[in-house]
Amino acid sequence: MTTQDKSTGTLSLSLILLILFLFACAPVWAQDNDDNQDQTDSAQVDEDSDEEDVEELAPVVSTGSRLLRQTYDSISPMQVITAEESREVGQIDAADIIQNASASTGQQIDLTFSGFVLDNGPGARTASLRGLGANRTLVLVNGRRLGGSGVEGAPSAADLNTIPGGLVQQYDILLDGASSIYGSDAVAGVVNTILRKDFNGWEVDYNTTVPEQSGGVEQRLNLTWGKNFDRGFIGFGAEVYDLEEVKYKDREWTNKCPEHYEVTESGEIRQNDIYNEDFNLRFHGNCYFQGLVGRVSVPEVGSIYYTPGVTNGGWPNFSESVSPFGGPIDTDGDGVADIGSYVPYSLYDHQTGASLFAELKTQALMTYGEYTFEGDANITPFFEASYTRRDTFQDSGQPQFFPWVPADNPYNICNPNGLNGVDCGLAFDALMSNPDIIASVLERFGCDPSAGGSCDQTIGAIGPQRTRPIIAIDGDRDQTSTTVELTRFIAGVRGDLPFMNFGSLDNWNFETSFSYHESDGVSSRRGIRQDHLDYSLNTSRIDPVTGEVVCGNNDGCVPINLYDPSLYSPIVSDFTTQAQRDYLFDSRDFRTKVEQTIFSGFASGYLADLPAGPMLGGLGFEIRKDEIQSIPDDIAREGLFFGFFADGGASGSKFTREAFAELEIPVLANMTMAEELTVNLSGRYTKDEFFPSANTYSAKVGWRPVSQLLIRATKGTSYRAPNLRENFLRAQTGFVNVFDPCHVPEEAWDAINDVYIPDQDDRRPEVLENCRQQGVDPTALYNNGFNTFSTEVATGGVTDITEEESDSFTYGFAWDVPFDAFNLTLGATYYEIEINNTIVEPSAQFIVNDCYNDPEFDSTFCNRITRDADGVFDIIDSGFINRDNATARGIDVNVNYDQSFALFNRPVDLGVDLVLTHTKENSDLFTNETGEINYDDDAGEYGYPDWQGTLNLRADFGKYRFAWQTRYIGDVHHDVDTLNEFDDYNGAMYTCAGPDNGDELCKFIWDIGSYTNHTASVSYRGDAWNIRFGVVNIFDKEPPQLDAGAPPILATNSPIGYGYDLNGRRYFLNVGYRF
């Protein structure tokens, strides 16, 4: 199937190329002999003119090559996004521009990822081309590598927050593998940010963006100065940027509870939860209930919920919600369960104060300059220096707080010897003796659960028992502040090598440079220390003299009452005394320093004068040292916060030594059917300190049968050595939900007799046997049907993994269509990138599935799973491994149209730019130890639409410009391996009763239709003043709304990281002045 898709895509592009080639060549073939002389004369004039122009042009280096040329022409496929074009649609921020490029597929890490454990730490934003990840996208600034930046863990990718968007001239996005030119990491492509160097005098520029809804105001001020001298120039730039925090409550699509979204077979969208109304007598409306708090987990029952002044059992101020036999508890018979809705207890329904977009502040300074000394060598020292600081603040929302309280703790609700405790066995018996419970069980099961009844469920006195309050404490682990400072300094010398001008050698030049990159970041968050909490809970006792509760041994311990009513209402609550808060709360602090030092040299020039032109060549070297020191405090390193991951930081360094060469050969020129035929070859030798040496190459061909049509092809290999994170990350843990196949399914357990029902167990025999071999009895491990657990997952760096290698192939065309009335340029490029031996962090669920589904009973992943004494997952090791092959294939399309015409006797310049990316494949291929192949293609799924791109329109009328942009994201669907079929509320649905009840079937809304967003602006550009006003998201298009249980990461019901606008309509103003 994959092979067929590949051949189809290749054939389609081949036919397009052939048709365009025939059209382009038609004018040449149509010339008669009488016109040949005129053509020759004209060509000669053009050639002479070109020679005169060449003398006036300074040599340049284009992205994708290191050779000096007289033009920016490049064989490599590339998208160029100018800062001016981006400003016209309200985009100045570098991260927004790069992440919204059509080639940036997959999930992009942006400011909406509050509360997630990110590779680069809190607040970071990274680039991912072709959906292949930030580690496979190389980011350059002015053609030089931008090192890793961030805080916590082991950040390795470049943080786009550190690029001063207001000081950028353009973004060159190179869209083929480029390791032979730029070294490791350039697998999916290269983003080269070119900063402005055209300052002449003073310039000041102010930008602001104001959303129609509250929050999210952006302000940016840029100040620049530059001076050009006869032999050099110097420039300075400064930028201050402020993005106001946007909370969930600030946007109408997130200022709500997570909701149901289901669609019937007839196309009706439904949201009301009738499942819980009909079966559980609970009324949730549209809301999902998740993250339930305001409750206590007690023996025999499960969770009892805070109901002040009321109980349906024997627990003061608490009530049970579910009958031991299943179904609701309605003790007063009013048709509404005693716990009539879980929504008041649902933490996620009270998170509207959390950050939708984190607060971001940046300050940047830069300076650059160069001076050329007199002499034949034109020796030119140069330097660049920059400093960027970014500060972020984010509120990730309140997490659950659920510690175990010892049985003998005097505050424990199930300690009958304590202050207000009861015997929870007798409290449960009181529930079973409730006449309404007896009546409901008799009606449903035909037996009496009370003492002496036909299905006696009473248990009698059980004495003190440990319990688990499940609550939420204000300010616990929810707010994070980070500061990252990035300093870069580059110094070097370039010049000519006149002594190399002999024989066929000519115009040789050189450049040597030294660069230093330092990222220094700190982060801080407050939370409850588990060691302090445990000490208080375990040592609390009633003083026999005073009758008061004390703890510890005169060491500052403060007794903590986790059953105090103040902790259960409101839903996010606080301790009654400041002393309790002061004792429990502390700060978790981190400092991360990433350094990169590079010394490089390169020389290039003419090797020979061939009939088609000079053959260019160059060779160079690069020595790079990468170092990280990521130092946590004791709280972070030991994981002393309750329910929060431990992070050991990282420490290590490594050297990389490289040598490279590039050769460009003009094969044919100025011939019929060969206006130009050029071959570019490059190669690089890389030696990483910890890994074997690697060789990469690239071969590129550019053919112009006529001057208007360029047909190009590239083929090469790329290389990615394990980065600082993958090598040196110390133990880092987090919590994820993992399904455990060793727990008995609910349908295979008899809740009345408390026994296993083998006939109702649909698990495969190899799953059961693998569980037994791992020391778990899969017929006895039962958790009331809840088989998904919040599990601690650990990862860490290793040096026994190997490097990634990839092959890339592109071919396409660029055609300047020969029309007199207008200019039209068409381009298309087919790309294919195949990565072998990819380095991955296997998900915890993958490890579990591979272990327990292995038919050979010897999966190596079983060694990564540790269970506690109760058989529940304790920790899963998901450290880095070489596992998969990854493939990305698709087509990029570019169309540019320009035309001038008169309107009211005034010239009007009209322009249209269309950039599209078609994703044909984005797949992973994994082969396990038994040879079983697992192939997963994400094309057409979230982040990988069939088509996505932008259409830009512009019209210049004198000093005024009108601009319009339409951004398009094609429809996407969920993974076909994740079942989402039409069903009723006896199955998986909530809003449809099904045909047996006179209703329809429905299914979850997990798929997203095509999405368009529009922006427009009007600008004036005078001799001194520039003024621009525009509207982003003119029609206030809201983001897609998916069912709250949909697979992608959601902000309430809106998917994040996929390019959908979560900000709504906003207005922007740009004012600039040149002195």
Image (cartoon, rainbow, N blue to C red):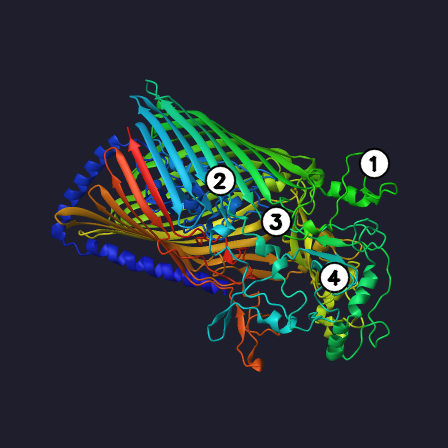
Tell me: 749 left or right of 653.
Answer: right
x and y, in percent, of residue 470 in the image? 70, 54
In three-dimensional space, the C-alpha distance between marks 2 and 3, rounded to whole angstroms, equals 21 Å
Tell me: 895 left or right of 286.
Answer: left
x and y, in percent, of residue 518 in the image? 53, 30
Inspect the image, locate mark 1, and give the three-letter code of the amino acid beneath it.
Asn
Residue occupied by mark 2: 360
In the figure, 608 relative to 949: above or below? Answer: above
Inspect the image, locate mark 2, and give the three-letter code of the amino acid beneath it.
Leu
Q: Give me the residue at 55% from left, 48% from top.
A: 354
Tell me, yes or no, whether the two marked residues, 2 and 1, touch with CB atoms within 8 Å: no
Could you tell me which secondary element the residue under label 4 belongs to? Answer: strand
Tell me, yes or no, whether the two marked residues, 4 and 2, touch with CB atoms within 8 Å: no
- Which comes sooner in the sequence, label 4 or label 3? 4
In three-dimensional space, the C-alpha distance between marks 4 and 2, rounded to whole angstroms, equals 43 Å
> From the viewer's perspective, is the residue at label 2 or at label 3 nearer?
3
Residue occupied by mark 4: 302
Q: Give me the residue at 60% from left, 46% from top.
A: 117
In three-dimensional space, the C-alpha distance between marks 2 and 1, rounded to whole angstroms, equals 45 Å
In three-dimensional space, the C-alpha distance between marks 4 and 3, rounded to whole angstroms, equals 23 Å
> From the viewer's perspective, is the residue at label 1 or at label 3 nearer?
1
Could you tell me which secondary element the residue under label 1 belongs to? Answer: loop
Q: In the rendered image, which quarter is residue 230 located in?
A: top left
- Which comes sooner in the sequence, label 1 or label 3? 3
Could you tell me which secondary element the residue under label 2 belongs to? Answer: strand
Quarter of the figure with the C terminus: top left
Residue occupied by mark 1: 553
Looking at the picture, tell me which residue is in the foreground, 341 or 73. 341
> From the viewer's perspective, is the residue at label 4 or at label 1 nearer?
1
Residue occupied by mark 3: 398
